[in-house]
Image (cartoon, rainbow, N blue to C red):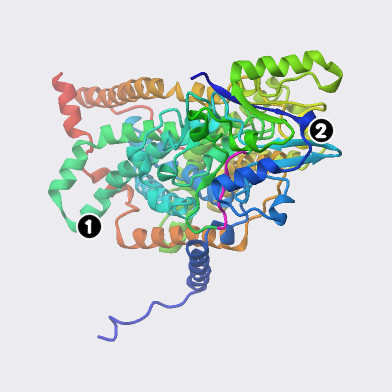
Amino acid sequence: MAAKAILFDSTQCVGCRACEEACSRKWAIDYGEAVASEERISERKLTAVVTHGERYARRLCMHCLEPACVSACPVGAFRKTPLGPVIYEEARCMGCRYCMLACPFGAPVYEWSKVLPKVRKCDMCPERLLEGKPTACSEACPAGATATGDRDQMIVEAKRRLAESPKQYDGRVYGLNDVGGTSVLMISEVPLGEFGLKWSLPQEPLPALTGRALAFVPDVVGVGAVLLGGVYWITHRREAVAAAEGAPRGGNKVERE
Amino acid sequence: MSRLIRLPRLTFWRAVFLLVAAAGLYAAWVRFVHGLGASTNLSDEFPWGLWIGFDVLCGVGLAAGGFTLAATVHIFNLKRYEPIVRPAILTAFLGYLLVVLALLFDLGRPYRIWHPLVMWNQHSVMFEVGWCVMLYTTVLALEFAPVVLERLRWQLPLRLLRAVLIPLVIAGVLLSTLHQSSLGSLYLIVPHKLHPLWYTPLLPVFFFFSAVMAGLAMTVFESWHSSRAFGRAIEMPLLMSLSRVLAVLLAAFLAMRFLDLSRRGALHYLLEPGVEKYFFLLESALFALPMLLLFQARIRSNPRTLYLSAVLAIFGFVANRLNVSVTGMEASSGASYIPKWSEAAVTLAIVALGFAVFYLAAKHLNVFQSAAEAHAAPQAANSLQRVMKGA
């Protein structure tokens, strides 16, 4: 099966929050008026509709092609699956929350109210994708603002809409290349930054940044061990030679003031 | 009999310790019974706070004197520093134990702290840090073990430990280099979150460098306090040389820091609105001031001014770590984070525990050797030297 993507078109969204409700039903999280009015994702809802005047956008895990959370997690609790979803395996998680720090989208949230909390986030309904079905939010959307399909085709569709009615969009397909590309694509009439979403991100995948530093580890160990061993040998050799020659040792003088 | 059950005299500092410990225990109860939400001001927007910023980032850095002095004496063969190796190793060992203790508070599921042992992700900086901290704590335990074994007069393990001392010290230096720098690498993945006054590809280099400085400053700090607590002569000539090195390191660090800012074109952030620049200037001043002081022989040769300069450098280091982990992360998060009382109480209690255990260890074990004792101690590397001569 080809890799999937969610395409969200802000211009089609009517702000009905059916996506939120469907998502909460899937996760068996209580969903009521109070939760609906919150415009942020949290342990109370894993996707949120945010309003900006008369316009609406969605927050959810963007399912990066090279996710920061997958690289950050010390115990490998996150995995990018071939179909697109970035999934979280609770049984591995020790709760260090480095994923939350690393995620550029603020997608992983924590169960702060629980004594034994876990991370929560949208998982792009992998069980539904495997059956060839759209995600719960896509299925619930009455306005056609959220849709699921092959990523390649969704990119073509997004670009088609931008080309067909250029005045209706700001000209960008969000998620096409941001942080190396994401499995959630968004198009909008105004820059998504105006909704308070973080969209001034590097085009380079974030794991590359830490990867470059980690690449030094073998060198530090190898060169360091040789260097320290060498210094040890020289400093102690000098001492052994001095002892053999019966000469007083130079250097190593104490500061006297 | 009455002498055996006599209670320790309640001094001012002991009373302070008891109060701090009581508050810490109550906060611990809140943390483990009611969870992180009830005991911290952390949020989805601000997932790392005081416990990571101070207890872990500062704790590990302040313990860097252990590997620095072990290398100075055992690798670089500067034997005159021998008398301050043991206290430095003790500080480091305690420091790491307390870091692990703090982690148990911060982890959402502390009983899974062992997971990185069997669940690997080599792409994770956190995974590397976890392994290095674990291995280095083991190294420190072995480096400190002789102090306990001497007291117990267990000769065989002592001889075994002496035979592997040099490989141990080398492993300790390598592990420390890796994780001290990697604590900085943790933040490489948040270029969009960490303020440009602190975000730089050189974060790992700066973290390592400043940890060495913090380790040296802590050596002065603990020497001063233990000399006062135990009425012991302070090792002035050693500390004077050490603090001259510290002054040079501070100067080099500041130079690198500002060169990096100008190279990245980030110096203009010092003129832009926002509170970050004040915190940056505070941090820089806390590095610059001890540097200027310690470059003067007059300041270095007076125990009190030497100590105060070291304290300033420690503050500078703590300011730097808190700026990276808290100040520099706040603006982008959109949340404002001020630690809850329980976070502060746990942190204070952990620091107090460190002081108390250090005091007890220094009192009952042969931590502060006199110079004569240190030299009389069997040459650690005898066996290795023989091997090398034979080769």
Can the viewer see residue B25? yes
Visible residue check, residue A72:
no
Mark 2 and mark 1 residues within 8 Å of each other at the beta carbon: no
Tell me the residue at 72%/30% (across/down): A144
Q: Is residue A108 magenta?
A: yes
Say which of B116 and A16 sits in front.
A16
Q: What residue appears at the point 73 percent right and 22 percent down from the top-left corner?
A: B265
Mark 2 on the same chain as mark 1: yes
Location of the N terminus of chain B (image quadrant): bottom left
**Quarter residue B262 falls in:** top right
Q: Depth check: B225 or A69 in front?
A: A69
Task: Please state the horizontal and vertical placement of residue B88, each as a whole percent of the image.
Answer: 40, 46
Chain where mark 1 sits: B
Q: How many marks?
A: 2
Name the residue at the bottom extreme. Answer: B2
Against B2, is A12 above or below? above
Give the main secondary structure of the magenta stretch.
loop
Q: Residue at x 32, y 51 (%)?
A: B369
Image coordinates of residue B376 in percent, x first then y, are 23, 45
- The magenta stretch spans residue B51: no
**Mark number for residue B151?**
1
Q: What stretch of residues is rendered in magenta?
A: A107-113
The chain letter under disc 2 is B
Which amino acid, mark 2?
Answer: Leu
Who's the residue at 16% across and 41% down the image?
B160
Q: Can you tell which quarter of the image residue B283 is in?
A: top right
Real-space Cα separation, disc 2 to disc 1, in angstroms = 59 Å
Amino acid at pointer 1: Arg
